[in-house]
């Protein structure tokens, strides 16, 4: 996974609860920066990293994810005190997503994805328990006539519970009923095995092991960095074991649209 250095803070994206920002980096690229010092905490970045990389492993249309090194000196020229504080609190390693210039928010009343893509995204969001892909906040963009998925900080909501047990991996995830693409997801049963086959235990372990120690060490009450990684791996691997209740839940929820 690449690491870029932030060279210029361009503008905040105030529609995001964690105040992400468009930045420029030392590779001359532009990115959307997610701060580890934001109010949502490092677990939002952990979810962004794990779920974003899982999406790429599933060949879903997701912008590149990179680590972003942030120097506190970057905030000296920023007039907004809130942003100054955020930059100082986020010195070091953060996360950034490739910026898609000219992209527009996915409009469910206009943009209609094909059944296999819609089904793949619904399957994936049910697997990763992403509660934030609804008609109120689609977290998808249209860019170069293609749909792109973004923003996975609200996924893996099990990790906000310190009394996690392996049984949580079998949760049906009833909140999938609110997914904005569910009406178009008519191929859920057909794509189930194909999607699951892309996420081997080896792939999952490699992705989870990329999570920086210092993000995990903020949650010492949940164990050391190694034990927390093992918990994510255990959850994600067990969740793929058949029969996959989250798939049946999505199929059942979609039946209400028929």
Image: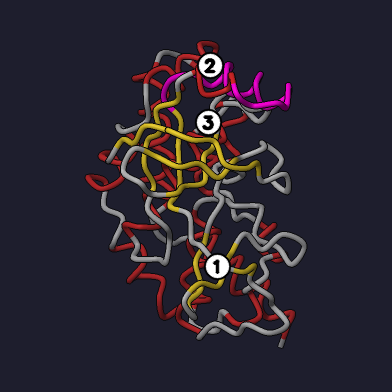
Q: Earlier in the sequence, mark 3 or mark 2?
A: 3
Quadrant housing residue 238: top left
Q: Which residues are magenta?
A: 77-93
Which residue lies under the disc numbered 3?
A: 165
Residue 160, above or below 133 = above
Residue 169, above or below 94 = below
Q: CA distance from mark 3 to mark 1?
A: 43 Å
Q: CA distance from mark 3 to mark 2?
A: 17 Å
**Circle 2 SS class:** helix
Q: Residue at x 31, y 43 (%)?
A: 27
Residue 69, above or below 26 = above
Q: Which mark is residue 219?
A: 2
Quadrant housing residue 26: top left
Indicate whether residue 89 is drawn in magenta: yes
- Residue 161 image position (x, y, % from top left): 62, 28
Which residue lies under the disc numbered 1?
A: 102
Dot in front, 3 or 1: 1
- Residue 80 image position (x, y, % from top left): 73, 27
Badge count: 3
Q: Residue at x 46, y 71 (%)?
A: 120
Q: Residue at x 43, y 40 (%)?
A: 235
Q: Nearer the viewer, residue 103 or 37?
A: 103
Q: CA distance from mark 2 to mark 1?
A: 38 Å
Q: Nearer the viewer, residue 4 or 216?
A: 4
Residue at the extreme front of the image, as rendered: 77
Q: Nearer the viewer, residue 7 or 33?
A: 7
């Amino acid at each position: 996974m690449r690491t870029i250095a932030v060279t210029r803070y361009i503008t905040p994206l105030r529609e995001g609860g964690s105040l992400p920002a468009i930045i420029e980096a030392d590779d001359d690229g532009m990115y959307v920066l997610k701060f580890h010092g934001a109010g949502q905490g490092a677990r939002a970045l952990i979810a962004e990293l794990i779920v974003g990389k899982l999406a790429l492993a599933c060949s879903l249309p997701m912008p590149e994810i990179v680590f972003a090194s942030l120097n506190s000196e970057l905030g000296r020229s920023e007039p907004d005190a809130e942003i100054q504080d955020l930059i100082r609190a986020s010195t070091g390693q953060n996360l950034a997503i490739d910026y898609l210039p000219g992209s527009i928010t996915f409009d469910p009343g206009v943009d209609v994805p094909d059944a296999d893509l819609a089904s793949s995204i619904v399957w994936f969001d049910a697997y990763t328990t992403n509660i934030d892909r609804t008609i109120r906040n689609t977290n998808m963009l249209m860019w170069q006539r293609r749909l792109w998925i973004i923003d996975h900080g609200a996924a893996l909501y099990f990790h906000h519970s310190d009394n996690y047990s392996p049984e949580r991996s079998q949760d049906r995830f009833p909140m999938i009923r609110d997914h904005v693409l569910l009406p178009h997801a008519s191929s859920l049963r057909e794509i189930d095995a194909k999607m699951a086959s892309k996420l081997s235990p080896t792939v999952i372990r490699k992705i989870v092991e990329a999570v920086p120690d210092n993000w995990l060490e903020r949650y010492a009450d949940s164990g050391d960095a190694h034990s927390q990684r093992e918990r994510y791996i255990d959850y994600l691997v067990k969740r793929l074991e058949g029969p996959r209740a989250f798939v049946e839940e999505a199929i059942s929820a979609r039946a209400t649209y028929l």
